Amino acid sequence: MGQLAGPTDPTADAHWEHTHPRKGFFTDTSICIGCKACEVACKEWNHNPQDGNLELLGSSYDNTGALGASTWRHVAFIEQGQERIAEARESGRALVNLGMPRIGPPADAAPDLSEADRTPPDTADFRWLMSSDVCKHCTHAGCLDVCPTGALFRTEFGTVVVQDDVCNGCGTCVAGCPFGVIERRSDGTVAVAAEREEQHAGHPAVPNVGVAQKCTLCYDRLLADETPACAKACPTTSIKFGDHDDMVETAKERVATLHAQGMTEARLYGANELDGVGGTGSVFLLLDEPEVYGLPPDPRVPTADLPQMYRRAGMAVAGMVAAAALAFWRGRA
Ligand code: SF4
Ligand code: SF4
Ligand code: SF4
């Protein structure tokens, strides 16, 4: 096992001999138009079944609601009024003043924005935030760390993938993911391997009832040197795919550009390798606080606390042994 927390190279930690550069996404929500082509392309490529009956949720123009075992990309539609937009702009400005997150490329490569017009644009009366969410392919992936069967594994591209035929449907990974991404495709029961084969045979479009499912970052396509289906289908390039380091740099440059245009609400999510999951493979540019998009503000991999837990358990055991020894010694005295 590699490091339990902090910055690291997940592929090297997984002991791959022939590694590729770590792959990832940069999802720029500022140019998403909510067309859901990414959602559809993902379902089509992966033969994932429909979620629900396509009726709108009632709270917005959304009909899927969240990521799930059959929805590996989910496009959120969040409606906001003028007051909330102004608050988002203010909270973004406060982040920059605190120096978090760091924006812009390193000083030696920074574009000259000193002459940029930083007058904030007029605050709109209304806007939709549209954001295509996906598995974060975390540097320290809680789902993978807690899986008891080894069904989840780290690929040579640094991504996290479920092996359907190894997963026993126990659901431990569901509790291990700090983002609520991975889910069992089931009605709450576990299907054994033989039953799954039967399901495959009868309903090829509804595979693997019972096993945990999530985005594979199109592992099959990466092996064929192809772009993931969702990124390929996105008409606005809101979903960018490439080497993880390049994605983070592009994301930082984009935040700097938006800030220079007065859009101080722009901020990054997942680009900080010092966060509770060591940074994520899928990086996002958001236009409001993470909670607005249903994302945890401070995700933390469960295993990050293991050393401290072991230390405390060790101290408790030592205390009990000392107490027992003292009682024994007093009994003899
Ligand atoms: S977001 Fe959740 S499911 Fe995806 S790699 Fe991280 S812990 Fe696993
Ligand atoms: S990378 Fe592939 S599996 Fe993941 S969301 Fe995109 S299309 Fe779906
Ligand atoms: S395909 Fe691109 S523009 Fe359309 S919803 Fe998905 S991320 Fe947004």
Image: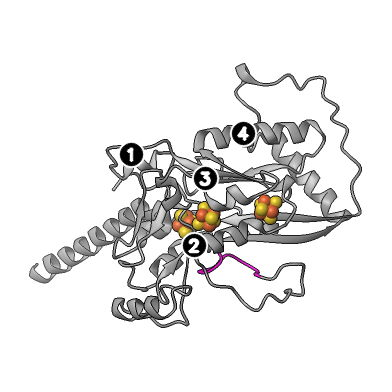
- Report helix, strand or loop for mark 1: helix
Residue under numbered circle 1:
12
**Within 10 angstroms of label 3, few (less than 14), some, or many (20 or more) residues?**
some
Q: Which residues are magenta?
A: 64-72
Which label number is shown at residue 268? none
Residue 229 in picture, x, y percent from top left: 55, 52
Inter-mark Cα distance, 2 to 4: 28 Å
Q: Residue at x 66, y 21 (%)?
A: 110
**Dot 1 amino acid type:** Ala
Residue 225 in picture, x, y percent from top left: 44, 42
Residue under numbered circle 4:
250
- Report helix, strand or loop for mark 4: helix
Q: Is residue 8 visible?
A: yes
Inter-mark Cα distance, 3 to 1: 23 Å
Classify mark 2 as within 8 Å of ligand 2 or not, answering yes or no. Answer: yes
Q: Nearer the viewer, mark 3 or mark 4?
A: 3
Inter-mark Cα distance, 4 to 1: 24 Å
Query: Quick one: label 4 or label 1, which is nearer the N terminus?
Result: 1
**Within 10 angstroms of label 4, few (less than 14), some, or many (20 or more) residues?**
some
Vertical position of residue 277 compared to residue 146: above or below: above
